[in-house]
Image: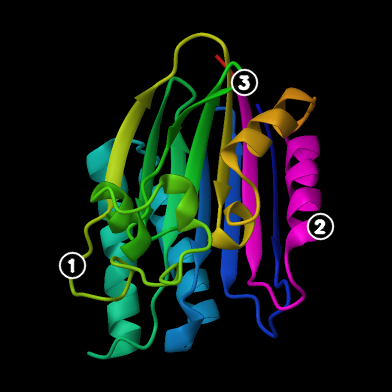
Amino acid sequence: MDYDFYSDRGGRNVNEDSVFVFADESGICALLADGLGGQGNGDLASQTVVRSVMDSYMRDRSVQPSAVAGYIGTANQRIREINQGKNTTMTTIVGLFSDLAGCTVAHVGDSRLYHFADGRLVMQTVDHSVPQMAVALGEISAEEIRFHPDRNRILRAIGADDHVKSDVQQLKLAPGFHAFLLCSDGLWEYVTELEMEADLAKSKTAKEWLHFMRCRRDMIAPDNADNNSGITLFLNV
């Protein structure tokens, strides 16, 4: 097992992304949240949710889908308490929970997880966003999400409603090499899936892979670009 992570405010005054990774001999919990700054308190939202989910995981240490959904539900309740009936504090979240035999992936919003098996992309989360809905309707391609005029219109977020619906799925890991990338839109918007794959092919460590992708992002992102964060994990099963 090998992992690395970073979070950068980009061209903004405040970094509203939060990341955290816990790993030991029995399991992994990797979390990334992107606060919705347009509503205010984005940094508070992302920090609160990451802390809440991590606390729940540390108490239970379960990676079962029902438990993971419960962790996110508890975090949503905490944000709703902060909001006091208003939608002023909201965030996305994406998480990977593993007991090293299998993994559970959960997300709300447009922060993403990509899963590569033996160097090839085999799975990625599906955004809860207006452009993703347009893809489902056949109006645009998945690649056109990146710079769509409605890119920032999120259909689900932690804190938006009293009850949050998270997408939770369990992954069965076949023997071999598995690589995971969790990232906010400030990273994936500027790095394509083919580029992620190419950078993975030349990386010996999770740190190298993340470095190569950050360099790609930094070369083309404008000076006022959004916060950007990522987590990379390598697992040999």
Q: Is residue 220 magenta?
A: yes
Labelled pair 3, 2 in contact (Cβ < 8 Å): no
Sooner in the amino-acid sequence: mark 1 or mark 3: 3
Stretch of the chain drawn in magenta: 206-235
Question: Which quadrant of the view contains residue 14?
Answer: bottom right
Q: How is the image coloured?
A: rainbow
The kind of residue on which mark 1 rests is His
**Front: mark 1 or 3:** 3
**Front: mark 1 or 2:** 2
Q: Residue at x 50, y 31 (%)?
A: 115
Query: Mark 2 highlights which residue?
Result: 219
Return the x and y of residue 127 as percentages of the image width and height.
37, 53
Q: Nearer the viewer, residue 78 or 157?
A: 157
Labelled pair 1, 3 in contact (Cβ < 8 Å): no
Residue 27 can be seen, yes or no: no
Return the x and y of residue 135 as percentages of the image width and height.
32, 50
Query: Mark 3 highlights which residue?
Result: 119
Q: Is residue 142 above or below residue 208?
A: below
Distance from Cα at disc 1 to Cα at disc 3: 37 Å
**Front: mark 3 or 2:** 2
Instruction: Give neighbour class at mark 2: few <14, some 14-19, many 20+ (Cα, 10 Å).
Output: few
Q: Residue at x 45, y 28 (%)?
A: 99
Q: Is residue 199 magenta?
A: no
Sooner in the amino-acid sequence: mark 3 or mark 2: 3
The kind of residue on which mark 2 rests is Met
Sooner in the amino-acid sequence: mark 1 or mark 2: 1
Return the x and y of residue 13 as percentages of the image width and height.
70, 85
Q: Is residue 100 left or right of residue 232?
A: left
Query: Mark 1 highlights which residue?
Result: 163
